[in-house]
Image (cartoon, rainbow, N blue to C red):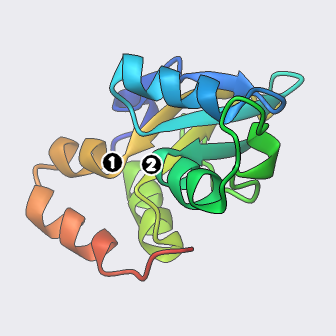
Amino acid sequence: MSRRVSDLMTATPHTLPLEATLYEAARIMRDKGIGDVLVTLAGRLCGMVTDRDIVVRGIAECRDPSLTPLSDVCTAEITTVRPNDDTETAARLMREQAVRRLPVVDAEQRPVGIVSIGDLALANGEAPGVLAAISKAPPHL
């Protein structure tokens, strides 16, 4: 029987508005021990910023973290899933899009959770196989 994304997602993901700064995102990541923050506009998902985005698109480009808005560095075109999607769909999307995390959104595109490659692997008891299959896809830069 297929499991739903809602069964294993992390509910209440950390979010920041589009105009928040790299510094704010980095502090949340540090304080919460996470590698990503969802970016919103009027409460709706409009992007994601990762620790890698901060380094590659921010620091390496000599951008001041306290002045640079997330809109300058976040990934705007992101793949999402819904809470009622099955975990096989989430794993397929991760593999096809070469991503390790998928935001979970409601019908109005409001973030309600996040599901990671690790969540899927552990939930299915297939950690090595699932991780290997998703990780084989080339990374998006």
Q: Is residue 107 visible?
A: no
**Dot 2 crowding, Cα within 10 Å, few <14, some 14–19, many 20+:** some
**In the image, is 87 to the left or to the right of 25?**
left
Q: Does the CB distance between marks 1 and 2 fall below 8 Å? A: yes
* Res 55 label: none
**In the image, is 136 to the left or to the right of 80?**
left
Q: Earlier in the sequence, mark 1 or mark 2?
A: 1
Determine which residue is flagged by label 1.
Answer: 2
Task: Name the quarter where the C terminus is drawn.
Answer: bottom right
Callout count: 2
Q: Secondary structure at mark 2?
A: loop
- Amino acid at pointer 2: Asp
Residue 11 locus on image (x, y percent): 47, 20
* Res 86 label: 2
Question: In the image shown, does 67 or 125 lie closer to the viewer?
Answer: 67
- Amino acid at pointer 1: Ser
Residue 92 locus on image (x, y percent): 44, 67
Compared to residue 20, the image places residue 12 above or below, namely: above
